Amino acid sequence: MPGLAYTAPYAPMALLLGAMLIFTKIWPSRLGLGATVAASIVFYLRWRIFETIPWEEGLSATWWPLVCLTVELVSLFDAVILIAILSRQTNRSAEADEGEQFLRGQWMRDAESLPEVDVFIATYNEPREVLEKTILGCLAIDWPNKKVWVLDDGRRQWLHDLCIAKGAGYINRPNNKGAKAGNINHALMQTGAPFVAVFDADFIPRRDFLLRTMGFFRDDRIGIVQIPHSFYNHDPMQTNLGLQQAMPDDQRFFFEAIMPGRDGWDAAFCCGSNSVTRRSVFEGIGGGLPEGSITEDMLLTLASLRQGYITRYLNEPLAYGLAPESNAAFFVQRQRWAQGAMQILYLRHGPLGPDLKLRYRFLFLPSAWLTQGLQTMFTLLTPIIFLLFNLLPMVNVDPAGIFCYILPMVWALLGGVSALAPGRYYPLAAQILGMFQSFRILPVAIQALIRPKGLIFKVTPKGSDAKGGGNWELGILIAALTLIALNFIGLVINMSPEHRIVSQMVLLPVVAFWVVLNMLMLLMVCMLCLEKPRLRAEERFDIRAGCGITVLNADHAPVRSDRGDISANGLGLQLEEDCAFTKGDRVQVVIPDVGMIWGTVMRGGRRLGVTFDFQSEEARDRLIVMLFTNPIEANAIRPSSLAVSLAVVKRFWAANLHVDLSMPQAHEPHEPEIKLDPATRVIVPAARSDRCGDDFSTGVTAATVLPRQARI
């Protein structure tokens, strides 16, 4: 039956597409999608193991196919775990609504009955422009019984003075033992509230942070409540490829798809910031965070699981921070995560330690830090090795086998993950970023696996300390260009019958397509290596519709608009017609819920630009609280995978590779900091005039109360 033989290679793909259509459109089912992907993997592995390895031949013929098979197996192991996680996502917003309603009612009846919360801001070397936002945001949290503590491991005089001026508590210690974990543990000994909220120095909580999270603790099983890391700026991939308006930051997949899935398995974990923890969790594991790993947050969750506590995950953007602002900051962060993940394998509280359920051992294995990098490297190297050395990763493969087994498995994985995490996973962008980071992350992960001790906690640079621009990731650039050259050489050699190396010509078109795709992605990696400058000192946010800002002075008629953008330093208003203001004019800017701020016109016309000139700290504080403690729309887009892929291709086609090496950098020299002498200091937060009422708000200072809902 020649017709059947002709269509048979396409039958698995047709069945796969049909099943995915059923479970995504006709009868939506996460479990059905997960089962479809799992079946595709099993179907592929049966063929891969029993038909593509020359088992009957010697080691000289099997070593390379076995190496490739091993990498595939460990990668598919992690893929199966990922599919299982994504198939069980939760949405806890309804529970948070119920908890918030209960807490507001209790606050109205008896504010003192709400439990006390210590709010920790852990800091080491972050600059003032970062820390002041977090301090003001924490002070503005709606909660009657809270104390805000700044944990200063840098012992900086200016931060000590800033805390006193703003009314925040201040704690430092005589040494830096244990890095961030040691800093928090020292503060735990100086404080006593039954609940502890922890924020990194750059994360600014929304006013309702505690009202949305504390209700979960009515369940005695809940030991930690974690919320996503959301960002008000753009990460290096968005910035360097010019995709700020085309895709969200790369961590949306983890925080908005993976973590809700982990929550469905009761396997969500503390992420170091934006969390609330019962003090009894710390007391049950020795009085504080485990200090055996530089990723103390995941270790805390594993230790709490052994006590019977659960980490609950609420997928709501209740705090906003800074994504890495340069390639250097990006790699400091990711390398620390990879090193810490490898470290926990050797610790008693880690996933291989005693007294842990089997499912948690699988779900907390940090193998992805290795397998993703290995898979990426083999994806890049395998076709080159085939073209230059005629080494096949598998035998007995023809185009029919590719259509019947390989393509359905690849489509099942990429399409399955995209369907289970719509608007969060973008295959092409993920592959490009994976290539970019694997050059640096994989060696670090392997080194940490072999030598887990003695690793140093490196703080991710933030603010002015992290501003990049005009710098090349030279090592990655050279590696990417070398791989592009080897791919090109391999193709050229095998196009010539006289110099051809490949023996199975039937595979050459497929391998050529693979090589061209790799080369295109490597070119995008090269573009990522060039760091674009970030010209603004402060991030700008769109002014919300219907919330007009007025600009006026004594000489010209006032103008009002609700279109444009605003930052902590100034604003740009889009007007219907040219205004009378000219550059240098002194003006007054009236902002709803902030008041009047003086400013100087920097640009006239229909796009009015004003730089703020604050006459008092209170005015700037009010503006910061209004901007950062209410919902922020940055990185809010969730386009389809196809839309992002088209945007990436368009960006590649329209790429401007011109580099202006003369572009001045935005760095300003830091004045030498005055350090406090090494000793323990505890300055108690100032008494605050908190009040409860319809808006449940607290003031920026003891004499100032702001409305709960800002309008910009």
Image (spheres, helix red, strand yellow):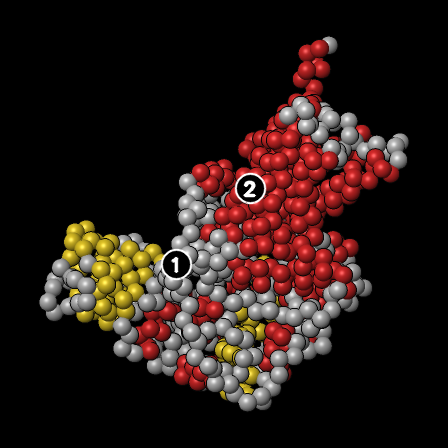
Residue 185, visible in the rendered structure: no
- Identify which amino acid the numbered label 1 is placed on: Ser
In which quadrant of the rendered image does the C terminus lie?
Answer: bottom left
Q: Secondary structure at mark 2?
A: helix
- Examine the rendered structure and indicate whether residue 693 appears above or below residue 712: below
> Which residue lies at the image location 27% right of the left edge and 66% below the top edge?
611
> Which of the 4 quarters of the picture holds residue 132?
bottom left
Badge 1: residue crowd in 10 Å (few <14, some 14–19, many ≥20): few
Taking the image as shown, residue 450 lies to the left or right of residue 561, namely: right
Q: State how far apart marks 1 and 2 are (Cα).
A: 28 Å
Query: Where's residue 60, x and y in %?
Result: 85, 37
Q: Give the residue number, with chain letter if any, for mark 1.
A: 662
| Residue 521's disc number | 2
| 209, 611: nearer the viewer | 611
> Which residue lies at the image location 74% right of the left edge and 33% below the top edge?
390
Badge 2: residue crowd in 10 Å (few <14, some 14–19, many ≥20): many
- Identify which amino acid the numbered label 2 is placed on: Met
Instruction: Give whichever of discs 1 and 2 has the lower sequence position.
Output: 2
| 424, 108: nearer the viewer | 424
Number of callouts in the render?
2
- Examine the rendered structure and indicate whether residue 67 appears above or below residue 631: above
Query: Where's residue 511, x and y in %?
Result: 65, 31
> Which residue lies at the image location 13% right of the left edge and 59% below the top edge?
580
